[in-house]
Image (spheres, grey):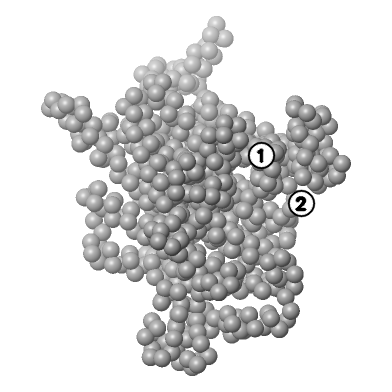
């Protein structure tokens, strides 16, 4: 009997949104759920999003465990085994995906390269959120002259062709102190961080403008809450959902930029392995040994696809009204 | 409306000016000059570097170099002294951006950047210049993207939740996420290496075959994006009351779709198409580099490797200008499509 009750409660839990006519008694037995539990529930019911999550988690694990997983160091060269074909053609199992032009194991470089791609999105997107979020929050909350001034600055940045600015910065600072740090990763972070925060600023400002008018903000003000408290405790939690979605779409943008820049010789400096500069290396032997370019290109494609699935899923989960 | 147009056109000026300053400063911050080594990597003798630096005004103070480049300062020693405006100041000769001269290229000795970007083989039409080729590729990619994406999105919405819808939605999701140059790799291997159907690095771009792969690689992302967006907005519009009203008064299905649904669904689509065109124009570096395309993007990538500052600066400015124009055009189309919007 007890079992049956929990089963009913469980099924009602799922049905509450569509069937408000259920008896109140069994509704009370269901635990109250927050927006986030709800969203998580919807997200895990979305097959595409789950596939995306699995792929992202997989590559994160690969990146974290790279030293343990990779059979060789990313720069260990074997000059007597250059351009080895992959194991399933005429190569051998010591080099599963074969070797590149200087005898480096392709699989090991792929595994090490995952570190760059998985980390390259995080820092710039966090800075976008921090800077853009702050600017948008202040502009939207203060309004008036502050808003006007801040948004003009945002407009100027918005009018800039982002990719061009990233390319110029990468080219100009490539041979400076900044460009040599962490195999060029620090410069990449800087260039990506400077471009793109204005999108977050616009998003946050728009959200703040609409939330500012809500009754609960007025209520908070009447009981004497400070501006800071209203911004942090009352506004911020309510704009987190669209911000989260913008993160999910911002990260693949950065991964794409890294791959593209490294491909034209501007991104991560060799010998550090990144999928982008592996594509660049592999391009030279695209006819004789296509696996060298296909392998990193597949990884880039797969990760970007995973983030897109995840982003779509998050958007649908966090804002059910937008779901088509 | 006209006031808005003029204001938007004027807005281009500070943007181009600012990006020219930023680009110039960054190029100056770059360690190493364009004449440090020869094309072969050998060090040049000091005297020759000095002569070259004088020839290209690289021995002047930075602010003066910038003014010369912008065409606000005479570029000859004889005209030294007073600044000139728009090149009309008597015998003093200015040759800079304002006069349509993007300066000499350091890499291709004796040739100007304007010439490199816009010159065509003798007796050939303008679109065979580097600029023209890039514009051509951008327009082809754009047309391909818009003309496949919009119909697919409409079909998806009209056949909502059928296999046709799922198939096109799935395809769109995959292609929207795959970057063009990654796709280009697979296209080159499949169609060039395995099937031998299409050339990979073409010399002659006056036939149709070499254009197919770059156009597809460039435009398919846009096609996927517009398909998704068109589908979403169409579904939204089809739920509106005025569609039901139109149906209820006995209009034919076709008329309801074309006159009531489609026109309204196209508004958000039109707003993204402008930035998309701009994105295609600038986003083609990677594709151009991949297919050895004789356009601006490949020139740009080569110029960065060779530290050819004037080519980098000139190309950047041209790109910025084109993007600004594309964004302006879309705003105007937006206003024309949706009469509720008025700019003042």
Identify whether A121 is placed above or below B11: above
Residue B295 is marked as: none
Q: Position of residue A207 (x, y in %)?
A: 42, 49
| Front in this rendered view, residue B40 or A219 | B40
The residue located at (47%, 30%) in the rendering is B171
Residue B278 in which image quadrant: bottom left
Q: Secondary structure at mark 2?
A: loop
Q: Position of residue A176 (x, y in %)?
A: 70, 67
Q: To which chain does the residue with label 2 belong?
A: A
The residue located at (39%, 25%) in the rendering is B165
Q: Secondary structure at mark 1?
A: loop
Q: Is residue B86 visible?
A: yes
Q: Which residue is mark 2?
A: A271
The residue located at (37%, 41%) in the rendering is B146
Identify whether B141 is placed above or below B51: above
Q: Residues under labels 1 and 2: Cα distance?
A: 23 Å
Q: Position of residue A322 (x, y in %)?
A: 40, 35
| Front in this rendered view, residue A65 or B47 | B47
**Crowdedness near tag 1: few (<14), some (14–19) or many (≥20) residues, C-alpha within 10 Å:** some
Quick one: which residue is furthest to the top in this view? A1
Q: Position of residue B111 (x, y in %)?
A: 53, 72
Residue A287 is marked as: 1
Q: Is residue A138 visible?
A: no
């Amino acid at each position: 009997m007890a079992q049956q009750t929990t089963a009913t409660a469980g099924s009602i839990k799922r049905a509450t949104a569509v069937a408000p006519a259920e008896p109140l008694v069994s509704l009370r037995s269901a635990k109250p759920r927050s927006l986030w539990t709800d969203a998580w529930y919807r997200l895990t019911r979305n097959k595409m999003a789950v596939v995306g999550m699995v792929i992202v988690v997989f590559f994160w694990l690969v990146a974290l465990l790279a030293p343990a997983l990779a059979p060789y160091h990313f720069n260990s060269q074997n000059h007597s085994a250059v351009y080895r074909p992959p194991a399933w053609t005429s190569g051998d199992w010591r080099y599963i995906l074969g070797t590149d032009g200087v005898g480096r194991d392709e699989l090991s470089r792929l595994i090490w390269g995952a570190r760059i791609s998985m980390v390259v999105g995080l820092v710039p997107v966090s800075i976008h959120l921090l800077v853009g979020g702050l600017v948008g929050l202040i502009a939207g909350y203060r309004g008036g002259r502050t808003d006007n001034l801040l948004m003009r600055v945002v407009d100027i940045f918005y009018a800039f062709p982002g990719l061009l600015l990233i390319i110029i910065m990468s080219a100009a600072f490539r041979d400076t102190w900044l460009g040599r740090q962490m195999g060029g990763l620090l410069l990449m972070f800087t260039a990506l961080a400077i471009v793109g925060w204005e999108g977050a600023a616009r998003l946050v400002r728009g959200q703040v403008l609409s939330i500012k008018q809500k009754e609960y903000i007025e209520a908070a003000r009447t009981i004497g809450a400070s501006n800071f408290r209203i911004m942090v405790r009352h506004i911020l939690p309510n704009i987190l959902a669209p911000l989260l979605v913008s993160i999910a779409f911002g990260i693949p943008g950065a991964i794409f930029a890294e791959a593209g820049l490294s491909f034209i010789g501007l991104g991560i400096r060799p010998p550090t392995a990144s999928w982008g500069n592996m594509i660049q290396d592999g391009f030279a032997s695209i006819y004789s040994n296509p696996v060298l370019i296909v392998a990193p290109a597949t990884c880039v494609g797969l990760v970007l696809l995973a983030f897109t699935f995840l982003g779509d899923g998050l958007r649908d989960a966090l804002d059910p009204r937008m779901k088509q | 409306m006209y006031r808005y147009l003029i204001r938007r056109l004027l807005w281009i000026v500070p943007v181009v000016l600012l990006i020219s300053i930023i680009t110039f400063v960054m190029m100056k911050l770059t360690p190493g000059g364009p004449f440090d080594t020869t094309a072969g990597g050998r060090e040049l003798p000091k005297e020759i570097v000095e002569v070259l630096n004088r020839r290209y005004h690289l021995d002047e103070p930075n602010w003066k170099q910038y003014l010369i480049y912008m065409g606000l300062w005479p570029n000859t020693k004889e005209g030294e002294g007073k600044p000139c405006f728009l090149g009309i100041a008597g015998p003093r000769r200015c040759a800079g951006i304002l006069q349509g001269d993007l300066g000499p290229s350091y890499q291709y000795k004796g040739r100007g950047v304007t010439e490199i970007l816009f010159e065509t083989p003798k007796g050939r039409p303008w679109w065979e210049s580097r600029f023209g080729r890039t514009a051509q590729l951008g327009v082809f990619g754009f047309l391909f993207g818009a003309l496949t994406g919009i119909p697919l999105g409409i079909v998806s919405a009209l056949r909502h939740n059928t296999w046709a819808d799922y198939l096109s939605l799935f395809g769109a999701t995959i292609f929207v996420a795959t970057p063009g140059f990654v796709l280009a790799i697979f296209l080159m291997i499949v169609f060039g290496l395995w099937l031998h159907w299409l050339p990979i690095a073409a010399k002659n771009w006056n036939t149709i075959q070499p254009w197919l792969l770059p156009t597809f690689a460039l435009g398919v992302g846009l096609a996927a994006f517009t398909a998704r967006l068109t589908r979403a907005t169409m579904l939204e519009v089809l739920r509106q009351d005025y569609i039901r009203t139109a149906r209820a008064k006995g209009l034919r299905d076709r008329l309801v779709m074309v006159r009531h649904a489609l026109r309204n669904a196209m508004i958000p689509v039109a707003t993204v198409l402008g930035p998309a065109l701009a994105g295609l124009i600038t986003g083609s570096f990677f594709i151009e580099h991949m297919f050895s395309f004789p356009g601006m993007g490949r020139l740009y990538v080569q110029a960065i490797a060779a530290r050819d500052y004037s080519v980098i600066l000139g190309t950047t400015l041209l790109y910025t200008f084109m993007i600004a124009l594309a964004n302006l055009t879309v705003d105007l189309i937006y206003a024309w499509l949706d009469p509720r919007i008025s700019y003042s």
